[in-house]
C-alpha cells in the first residue's frame, strides 16, 4: 500500500511540479528521433558524362571498374598551366593532387570508374601481387619487366613500381599466371580533403 502511494506521489510530482521538464524531455526525444533515421548517408557520387562512358572492363578485388579511355588525371599544377593552352578540356572533378579531365592525350594518369560506388579512381604507378610462393617475386619482376620495391614474406605480397599505363595489360597477363593468387593495383579512390 505504501508503494502505491509513493508511486502516485512521484507521478503527481512529475505531472504537477515539473511539467516543463517533461515537455522539454519529450521535445528532445522527438528531435533526436527525427535527426537520425537509421540510414547511413551515401558519400557524394561523381558524375560520368554519357559520351565519356567508354573503355575496357577490369576487376580489382570484388569491385568492377571501367578503364576510361577518354579521361585522364593530371596533377593540379600541370593542369592549370595546360588549361590555358587547351581550353577544350572538360574538368570532371578532383582527387587529392589530381584534376580529372576529359582528354584524349596520353598525358597524365589513367582513370577508372568504380561501377559500384559511382566514383572515379586514379591508377597509380604501383602494382601489388599476392603470390602463392613469395620466393617467385624476383622471377616475376624479371619476366614482366617490373621493379620490385617491397616484399612482405609473411603475407606473401610483393609490390612493384610500374608505369600506370601498363597496368591493365599486366593485370590480364598476371591473372593468368599460376604463381599469382591476386593482382592489386594501387588506386587513389577516396582522397581526404584538408579541413
Image: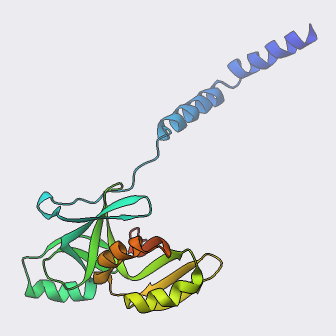
Number of marks in picture:
0
Left or right: where does residue 190 sit relative to residue 156? Answer: left
User: Where residue 34 sits in the image (x, y, percent)?
Assistant: 48, 35
In the displayed image of the protein, which residue is found farthest to the front? 178
Identify the residue at horizontal 44%, vertical 72% (top origin): 183
Viewer can see residue 195:
no
Against 12, residue 24 (above or below) is: below
Is residue 3 toward the left or the right of residue 151 in the image?
A: right
For residue 14, side relative to residue 167 (left or right): right
Kindly identify the residue that appears in the image at 31 percent across and 56 percent down. Answer: 115
Please name whichever residue, 64 or 94, is drawn nearer the observer in this view of the structure: 64
Q: Report the residue that reaches farthest toward the top.
A: 1
Residue 130 vertical position relative to residue 62 in the rendered view, above or below? below
Give residue 165's position: percent from left, percent from top: 28, 82
x and y, in percent, of residue 107 in the image:
20, 86
Quarter of the picture containing the N terminus is: top right
Vertical placement of residue 44 versus 72, above or below? above
Residue visible at 39% across and 71% down in the picture: 176
Could you tell me which quadrant the C terminus lies in? bottom left
The picture places residue 172, in percent across and down from the top left corner, at 33, 72
Amino acid at each position: 500500500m505504501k508503494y502505491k502511494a509513493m508511486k502516485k506521489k512521484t507521478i503527481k510530482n512529475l505531472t504537477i511540479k515539473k511539467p516543463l521538464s517533461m515537455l522539454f524531455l519529450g521535445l528532445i526525444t522527438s528531435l533526436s528521433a527525427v535527426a537520425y533515421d537509421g540510414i547511413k548517408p551515401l558519400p557524394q557520387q561523381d558524375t560520368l558524362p554519357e559520351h565519356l562512358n567508354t573503355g575496357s572492363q577490369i576487376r580489382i578485388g570484388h569491385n568492377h571498374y571501367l578503364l576510361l579511355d577518354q579521361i585522364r588525371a593530371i596533377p593540379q599544377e600541370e593542369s592549370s598551366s595546360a588549361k590555358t593552352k587547351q581550353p577544350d578540356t572538360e574538368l570532371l572533378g578532383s582527387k587529392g593532387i589530381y584534376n580529372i579531365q576529359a582528354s584524349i592525350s596520353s598525358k597524365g594518369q589513367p582513370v577508372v570508374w568504380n561501377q559500384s560506388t559511382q566514383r572515379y579512381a586514379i591508377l597509380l604507378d604501383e602494382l601489388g601481387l599476392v603470390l602463392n610462393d613469395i620466393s617467385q617475386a624476383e622471377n616475376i619482376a624479371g619476366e614482366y619487366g617490373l621493379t620490385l620495391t617491397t616484399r612482405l614474406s609473411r603475407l606473401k605480397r610483393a609490390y612493384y613500381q610500374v608505369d600506370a599505363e601498363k597496368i591493365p595489360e599486366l593485370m590480364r597477363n598476371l591473372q593468368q599466371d599460376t604463381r599469382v593468387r591476386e593482382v592489386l593495383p594501387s588506386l587513389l579512390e577516396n582522397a581526404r580533403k584538408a579541413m
